[in-house]
Amino acid sequence: MGKLVLVRHGESELNMENIFFGHLDPKLTEKGQSQALKAKEILSNIDYKKIYSSPLTRAIETADIEWKENWRTYDYQTGESVQQLQKRSVNFVKSLDLSTGNIVMVCHWGVINCILSYYFSGGLNGYWKFAPNYAGIIVIEFTDGYPVLKGINIGDVDGII
C-alpha cells in the first residue's frame, strides 16, 4: 500500500500578514520559492505515482472575524465551513488508489489539517493541533486500512526548532 504525501505550499505574500485571504492568488515570496525548491529536492527521493494540486493559492475566503467562535460550521459566504472542507478533502483522499504507489497532494494548511484531524482524531477535534509548515512534507502510510503518521514537516529545520 502506498503513502499519501501532503505538501503545504510555500510562504506567499499574504501569508506574511497572518490573514485568510480566500480566492486571491498571491505569488510566493522569495522564502516561499526557496521552501518549494527544498520540498522539490526532498520529493525527488520519493517514488510517487501521481501528484495533485489545488487550482487556487488558497482554499478559504474570509474577512469576518466571527468564524473563530463557530469555526467548525461557519459558512464563509463564498467558501465553505471547515466541516464541509473536511468532508470534501477526506472524500478526495478516500477516492485515491494508493494500492499502486505513493501519491503527492500539494495543497493548503486547512486541507492538510482537515485530513490529519480526520485520520488522527476522528473528526475536527485535532484541527488546530497540527502545524504543517510552508513547503512542509507530511507522510501518511495506510497499512491494512489504518493510517500511520510517518512524518510531519520532513526536511523543514526552520519550523521545528
Image (cartoon, rainbow, N blue to C red):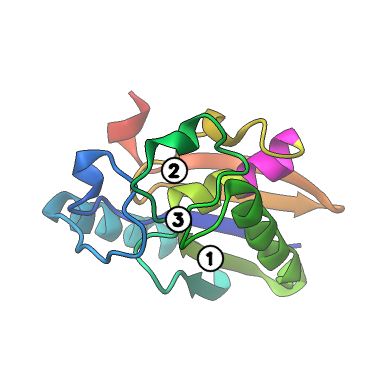
Q: Which residues are magenta?
A: 115-121
SS assignment at label 1 = strand
Where residue 18 sits, quadrant-wise, is top left
In the image, residue 158 above or below residue 94: above
In the rendered image, the residue lying farthest to the top is 161
Label 2, label 3: how far apart the Cα atoms are: 10 Å
| Quarter of the N terminus within the rendering | bottom right
Say if 106 sits above or below 159 in the image: below
Q: Which element type, helix, strand or loop, lies under badge 3?
A: strand
Residue 120: x %, y % from top left: 71, 37
Question: Which residue type does callout 1 highlight?
Answer: Val
Going by the numbered disc 2, the residue's amino acid type is Ile
Disc nearer the start of the sequence (1/2): 1
Looking at marks 2 and 3 on the same chain, the residue that comes earlier in the sequence is marked by: 3
Residue picked out by circle 3: 7
Residue 138 visible in the picture? no
In the image, residue 134 lies in the stretch drawn in magenta: no
Image position, residue 122 (x, y; %): 77, 38
Where does residue 28 sit, x and y in percent of width and height?
20, 59
Q: Nearer the viewer, residue 120 or 17?
A: 17
Question: Disc 2 designates what residue?
Answer: 154
Magenta stretch prevailing secondary structure: helix
Hey, what amino acid is under mark 3? Answer: Val
Given residues 88 and 119, the one toward you in this image is: 88
